[in-house]
Image (cartoon, rainbow, N blue to C red):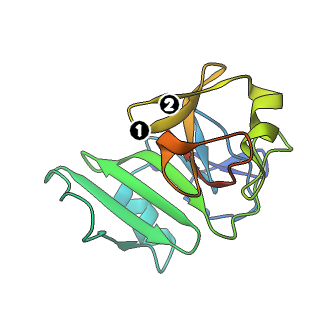
Amino acid sequence: MATPLLRGGCRNLMPQYNSAAPILPGTGAAGIVLGTSIAELVASVPGFESWEDDSLPRLPADIARYRYRDVDVWGEHAQVTQVMVRADYRGALRDRLTLGMRLRDFEAVLGRVELLDLSLKFESEPGMSVEIEGRPGAFSQDSVVTAIYVF
């Protein structure tokens, strides 16, 4: 049986991609719940494909990355372990924080951001991190959030 996925606040039995679904740290985003079977996700959402960035170090054999439209998914041991939303994703974190907003907007809601292991993380939301324009080590409150990771 498939792992339940989020869709408009309901739980479904099959993966349902949704570019406006809420971003839920520690749970999922884009309608994809952490722990979902990669095989079921790829089978139920045509266009989800394995993806590698040649500019980054190669992933270990038991970790795979998949991409579809404005979402990337990492899987380990055949299950979703991380979801990243980017580009034109329209869903929000806490009903108000979206891509394209400034880091100061996130800090006003989530508290101070910290640079940990090259990721920008918030103490109040341990199941997420953000990516900004430019280098993570050179962030300021004016930095624009370009991706949100959920794990």
Q: Nearer the viewer, residue 125 or 100?
A: 100
Q: Is residue 60 above or below residue 58?
A: above
Q: Are marks 1 and 2 in contact (CB under 8 Å)?
A: yes
* Residue type marked 2: Leu
Q: Look at 61% across and 35% down and name the residue there.
A: 25
Local secondary structure at mark 1:
loop
Label 1 crowd bin: few (<14), some (14–19), many (20+), radius 10 Å: few
Q: Look at 59% across and 58% down and name the residue there.
A: 133
Determine if residue 3 is in view. Answer: no
Where residue 121 appears, as percent x and y from the top left, is 56, 31
Where residue 103 appears, as percent x and y from the top left, is 72, 42
Q: Is residue 112 left or right of residue 118?
A: right
Residue under label 1, please give it: 118
Label placed on residue 115: 2
Label 2 crowd bin: few (<14), some (14–19), many (20+), radius 10 Å: some
Where residue 120 appears, as percent x and y from the top left, is 54, 36
Toward the top, the furthest residue is 123
* Residue type marked 1: Leu
Instruction: Give the distance between the C-alpha atoms of the residues marked 1 and 2, in whole angstroms.
Output: 6 Å
Q: Is residue 8 above or below residue 19?
A: above
Q: Is residue 96 left or right of residue 72?
A: right
